[in-house]
Amino acid sequence: MKNRILATILCICVVTGAIGVPIAQAGWADADTETPPSRWTNTSLVTLDMSLKNGTITSSGLVVGKTGTTRISVIFTLEKLVNGRYTYVDSWSASSNSTICSSTHDTKNCTSGTYKLTVTGTVTKDNYAEPIEDWLIKTL
């Protein structure tokens, strides 16, 4: 009987995990707020997006530093999922000497599929060049 109960609980955990239902969620110090703390010290926001139209993927990225940011320098990399692995498609860089760095880039001769857009770089504030990395996976 114990094995059957254990097997049922395990099955429920596997199924809920597979469909994206969190079984447990990490909390943070201020439980009264709905917003988790930033995972970066110098960086307020990173947003990425991609769209495919007529064989061209338009990728956009925005990195916003906190007040006092003096430099943002990033590299964007676009990859396509092929046979279970991401393969390189394109990359480009962007930089700014202020708190906002944005980039829009077109990559031609693309077909539909699953793509990963990654941004890596540094956000400098108070002489600390904080490394950042974020990504977006999207089926186009």
Image (cartoon, rainbow, N blue to C red):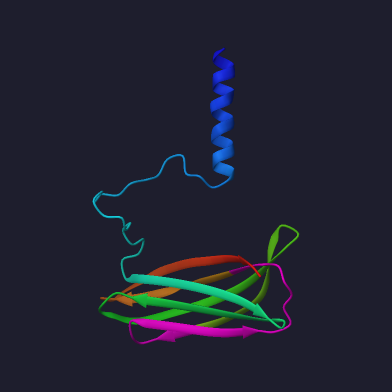
Q: Quadrant of residue 113?
A: bottom right
Frontmost residue, 114 versus 99: 114
Instruction: Please state the horizontal and vertical placement of residue 64, each as a whole percent of the image.
Output: 37, 77
Instruction: Please state the horizontal and vertical placement of residue 3, each as a whole percent of the image.
Output: 58, 16
Instruction: Please state the horizontal and vertical placement of residue 61, each as a whole percent of the image.
Output: 49, 78
- In the picture, measured across the screen, residue 86 lies left or right of residue 101, that is right
Q: Main secondary structure of the magenta part?
A: strand
Q: In the figure, 37 relative to 106: above or below?
A: above
Q: Residue at x 72, y 71 (%)?
A: 112
The outermost residue toward the top is 1
Frontmost residue, 93 versus 3: 3
Q: Residue at x 54, y 76 (%)?
A: 76
Frontmost residue, 35 versus 117: 35
Quarter containing the C terminus: bottom right
- Residue 106: say if magenta: yes
- Residue 88: say if magenta: no
- In the picture, measured across the screen, residue 107 lies left or right of residue 74, that is right
Q: In the figure, 30 relative to 118: above or below?
A: above
- In the picture, measured across the screen, residue 116 lies left or right of residue 135, that is right
Q: Residue at x 56, y 29 (%)?
A: 10
Q: Which residues are magenta?
A: 94-116
